[in-house]
Amino acid sequence: MKRATPTRSPRPSLAPYPQHPIHAFLLRAAQRFPDKIGLVDARESIRFAELEQRSARIASALQQRGFGKGERIGLFAANSVSFVASFFGIARAGCVVVPITASYKAGELAYQLGDSGARAVFLDPGLTPHLHQARPQCPALELAVLLGASERAGAGAGTIGLDQLLAEGKKPMPGVAIDPRRDLACLPYSSGTTGLPKGVMLSHSNLCSNVYQFHTCLPEYPVVAEDVSLNHLPYTHIYGLNVQMVGCVAAACRQVILSRFEPVELLGRLEAERATLLFTVPPVLLFLLGHDQLGRTDLSSLKYINTGAAPLAPSLGAEFAERTGVVVKQGYGMTETSPVTHVDYATAPRLETVGPPVADTDQKVVDPESGAELPLGEHGELCVRGPQVMQGYWNQPEDTRRVLRDGWFHSGDIASIDAEGYVRILDRAKEMIKVRGFAVAPAEVEAALLRHPQVADCAVVGVDDPEWVEFPRAFVVRSAGATPAAEELIAFVATQLASFKAPREIRFVDKIPRSPAGKILRRVLRQTVPGGG
């Protein structure tokens, strides 16, 4: 008889975790390496001491303007030095950062500012038209701070430039007393596949604990001050924010900041900067494999490439590693877990898994219906428990009770755990396709389709059917110049998976809708693509 699933991480414990506010990472970096260039973006480079001083002035100015502990402040901008200074300045004032994706339109901006009750927002000047449209729906909003040029037109009353705020902050103010375990540092919004996004309450301790967990989960390659990290993931997403932005400041390593993904620039900067760390998403690797610049780029400085935020097809990771000589591995997590819960080792990655849990993280799989814990190897909902798990959803007590039960966070993801604690993620529970009583994971079908040389990208959804209950429908982006027939691809999948898992229909499309972090937006696919299900 199979034994019950293990609940303890195989990695050494880090407890007790240091309890400090998140801006203490920047204070420590500035004390250790005051003259070291810590951040470089397209416009400027900045030393750690200068970054710390800038954040202190932002905090002081906010305090003078009456922003107290716990007040929410939006951060609506692309990656930049100013974004990083603003994040730490807002947190240092005791306020709560509400990161808002820079590609959002007015309605999405208004929803997050309004739902969070934000009194202020920091934003890029080019985004002011969206703010102008959103303002009528945000009655609490009274201050807008532009990160860049001094032009104020279009943002409305109460708009100033960051330069003015920094000038106001020359007068030092008393430090704000922060309880790291109770006080929130960040309120990102979860990009769930159904329903409106929910604010995820992350304390200073949640975020800081997860930085310590991630930095020590690879004993062969710890994140250290000598590292150079190329950061292209949006800092408004929890992966880019805590793993990259905060994590690099905590290690006092050099961050080379890209405001967006552009393949030639990414590859060129990796080589020129001799980057040692690249955190990315699987679609980027897929795109780079098809780019002729890849074969001409020296990537030998990279320790490894870590992917997350979306499933990594084992064939994709293996092919990229073979082509470049760089180890590819993946991790796993969620906004609700700050985000990292699992990371694979870089010495011998098991690409079919997301690795074992990070330190002090318990795990189990349960029956999604009954909640009963399942034995090793069986498929069920993955649940985790640890210091990185959120405090709950903002103003959503029912949703909080649904996912947080007896200290366990119920991820909604279907997974299995092996005898060594390695986890395989099969799919979202709500996205599992029921085919005549059999559960089919879309990610499994997608991985099979991606093995076909004429498939560039794909997504699979379930379609209601009176005979089958549901059947899988695939949306496929052809490789350049390729013209595979639908029947050919269906037959190809059927050679790899049980016949009931093969898609019954295939629709060819130009693009698969994805979030900024690379997740397939199945609800968008269903709503906007003809025949979306």
Image (tube, rainbow, N blue to C red):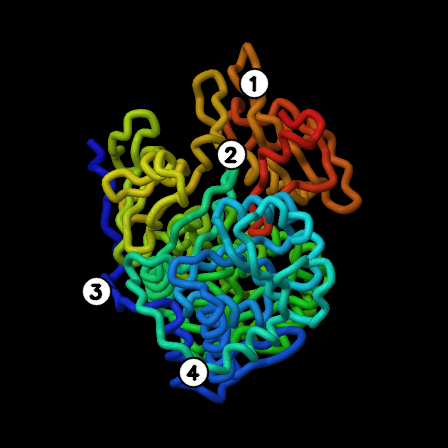
Per the model, the C-alpha gap separating discs 4 and 2 is 42 Å
Reading the chain from its start, which is encountered first: label 1 or label 2?
2
Measured as percent of width and height from the top left, residue 197 is found at 50, 41
Question: Mark 4 or mark 2: which comes first in sequence?
Answer: 4
Residue 432 is situated, as x and y percent measured from the top left of the image, at 47, 29
Whichever of labels 2 and 3 marks the residue nearer the N terminus, that label is: 3
Kind of element beneath mark 2: loop
Residue 313 is at least partly visible in this image: no
Q: Which mark is residue 195?
A: 2
3 or 1: tag closer to the N-terminus? 3
Disc nearest the viewer among 1 and 4: 4
- Amino acid carrying label 4: it is Ala
The numbered dot on residue 464 is 1
Crowd band around label 2 with a 10 angstrom C-alpha radius: few (<14), some (14–19), many (20+): few
Mark 1 touches mark 2? (CB < 8 Å): no
Residue at image coords 27%, 38%: 405
Q: Does residue 511 appear to the left or right of 35 in the view shown?
A: right
Name the residue carrying label 4.
Answer: 30
Near mark 1 (Cα within 10 A), the count class, few <14, some 14-19 or many ≥20, is: some
First in residue order: circle 1 vs circle 4: 4
Q: Amino acid at mark 3?
A: Pro
Mark nearest the camera among 3 and 4 is 4
Q: Residue at x 39, y 51 (%)?
A: 201
Q: Between marks 3 and 1, how big is the CA–CA gap?
A: 50 Å
Mark 3 highlights which residue? 16
